[in-house]
Image (cartoon, grey):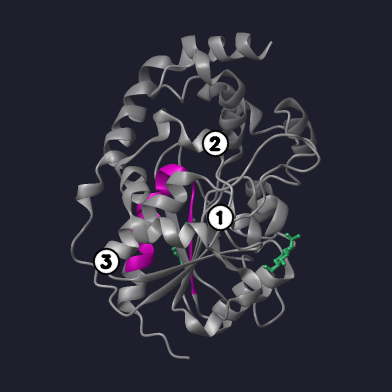
Amino acid sequence: MKIFLCLLGFASALSPVCSVQAAYASQENNAKQLSPSFNLQGKKILFVITSADKLGTSKMKSGYWMEELAAPYEILSKAGAEITLASPKGGLPPVDDFSLRKRFLSDYIKAFKKDDTAQKKLAKTIPLSQVKAEDYDALYYPAGFGIFMDLVENKTSIDLIESFSRAHKPMAFLCQAPAVLKNVKNAAGQEIVRGLNVTALRNSEEAGGAMLRPYVWLIPPGMEAIGNDLTYKREKLPEKEFLQKMDLTDKIPFLVENMLKSEGANYQAKPNMASFTVTDVTGDNGFLITGQNPYSAKEIAEKLAEVLQQIKVTQ
Ligand SMILES: *[C@@H]1O[C@H](CO)[C@@H](O)[C@H](O)[C@H]1NC(C)=O
Ligand SMILES: *[C@@H]1O[C@H](CO)[C@@H](O)[C@H](O)[C@H]1NC(C)=O
């Protein structure tokens, strides 16, 4: 049934979508485009990565999404920032194998894999319980499904984000990672995202990912967008039905787009797989930067670098 629907999508969506897709891919792959103007010497940035390798009670493997870790790591460290990697359990965090597929391979991932310092830090991530917010100038959460399991309801993570926010330090969350803001409050006790402009993975993109995973062998690299029009129809379904149709029931607790809207955020998004980030100022007077999807990994790192370079953090 799903194969049939994918192929239907293929026929109707193919031509316009594939050229757009190719344009993003070439942009994405050019690590050398990195603007040399960032100078983050002396800045310390904390990355928080999921330790969860399975989704809910299912056998579906999970972890972090490689591009979302690799691109910001390479961009920010090359600009001179000192990066610390942390995770709930500490040690080597699990990577979502799917994100290692050749179709998603970028120059950032290649550089990250060859980066000895990065690999050493990754093998020994610091347990979240040992992290002190006051030691860092900025915070970044990459996604991967795992964050739904060990970071959304995690008191240590919630307290950490609240500390950064109260200290007016810039915070960035990519793709599904804005889900970790669900229980975070500002100093006035309100949901931190209420009234703010934010983005995160679109429901249509979550649908696209779920459709692509089992049938990835059928779909040529560079054509991830086939069936896009079907994903835009799916995104209008009630959440329960959406999760059922996408075989995500009992795997993820909610859809991040829906959660942000229900908490009163002004959710914004571009078409599937476009690079997009949004910056707003929280009730605590801190910068909140959100990015839509893995294709926004470069842009979110550059936005964080821009903000970090401009502001003077006062403790
Ligand atoms: C939350 O983070 C703490 C601190 O790192 C960790 O010990 C704990 O296992 C995490 N909770 C969950 C549900 O993963
Ligand atoms: C929030 O988004 C709206 C458009 O929806 C825009 O007009 C407004 O300037 C944005 N606010 C900030 C603080 O960027």
Residue 236 visible in the shown view: yes
Closer to us: mark 1 or mark 2?
A: 1
Q: Taking 256 as reference, is 273 left or right?
A: left
Q: Quadrant of residue 194?
A: bottom right
Q: Nearer the viewer, mark 1 or mark 3?
A: 1
What label does residue 92 carry, if any? 1
Quick one: SS at disc 1? loop
Q: Position of residue 187 (x, y in %)?
A: 65, 82
Q: Position of residue 263 (x, y in %)?
A: 70, 60
Expressed as whole percent of the image width and height from the top left, the position of residue 198 reads 53, 58
Q: Residue, x 71% and y 32% (percent of image)?
A: 237
Residue 107: image location, x then y, percent: 29, 42
The residue shown at (42%, 15%) is 14
Give the alpha-carbon distance from disc 1 to disc 3, as whole Å. 25 Å
Q: Nearer the viewer, residue 179 or 32?
A: 32
Tell me the residue that label 3 is attached to.
79
Position of 82 with respect to 218 (left or right) is left
- Residue density around tag 2, few if under 14, some if 14–19, many if 20 or more, within 10 Å: few
Name the residue located 62 percent from the left edge and 68 percent from the top edge.
127
Do the residues under discs 1 and 3 have CB atoms within 8 angstroms? no
**Please, what is the three-letter code of the amino acid marked with disc 1?**
Leu
Amino acid type assigned to the residue bearing label 2 in the image: Asp
Q: Is residue 135 left or right of residue 263?
A: left
